[in-house]
Image: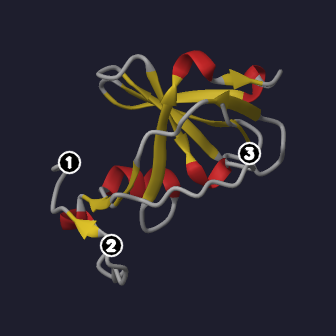
Amino acid sequence: MKKYEGSCLCGFVTYSFTGEIAGYNYCHCSGCRKASGTTYSTNAGVDITTFMLEDSKKYVKEYQSSPGTILSFCSNCGSPLFSKVDRTPNMIRVRLGTLDTEMDMKAKAHIFVSEKASWHDITDDIQQFENFAL
């Protein structure tokens, strides 16, 4: 079973998990754009029972972005790290930009393209959905 490791920008928060990464999408919804500070968010679901914070829990702060969704970030550098959603309690969604371990999986789709930034053009051949339609 593969072990993945990740960290925030300043290195105060480190984490690891083992197993498979669930498929991921590029989410262009306005909430994900604001939470990531860029054109889209790239998150992947992992089994919460294998997710471990490596002695850095005290640096993780949480924010309820909407009912049932908690975003977690580093309180020192502000890096977005992962989120938890009530409708999938056995899964944690890791921000793939914080992974330190290489990953060879490709995204399945662009979702919520109806909300994408007007100044961003999607130029790859990955399927697109106006909303969440997977």
Q: Position of residue 9 (x, y in %)?
A: 77, 51
- SS class of the residue under badge 3? loop
Query: Label 1 belongs to which residue?
Result: 134
Indicate the amino acid at tag 2.
Ala
The residue located at (45%, 25%) in the rendering is 91
Q: Does residue 17 lie above or below 123 as drawn?
A: above
Query: Label 3 belongs to which residue?
Result: 8
Question: Which of label 3 and label 1 is nearer to you?
Answer: 1
The residue located at (67%, 46%) in the rendering is 78
Query: Label 2 belongs to which residue?
Result: 117
Q: Are marks 2 and 3 in contact (CB under 8 Å)?
A: no
Indicate the amino acid at tag 3.
Cys
The residue located at (65%, 29%) in the rendering is 18
Quadrant location, the N terminus: top right
Question: Which of label 2 and label 3 is nearer to you?
Answer: 3
The numbered mark, 3 or 1, whose residue comes first in the sequence reads: 3
Q: Position of residue 86 (x, y in %)?
A: 34, 20
The numbered mark, 2 or 3, whose residue comes first in the sequence reads: 3
Indicate the amino acid at tag 1.
Leu
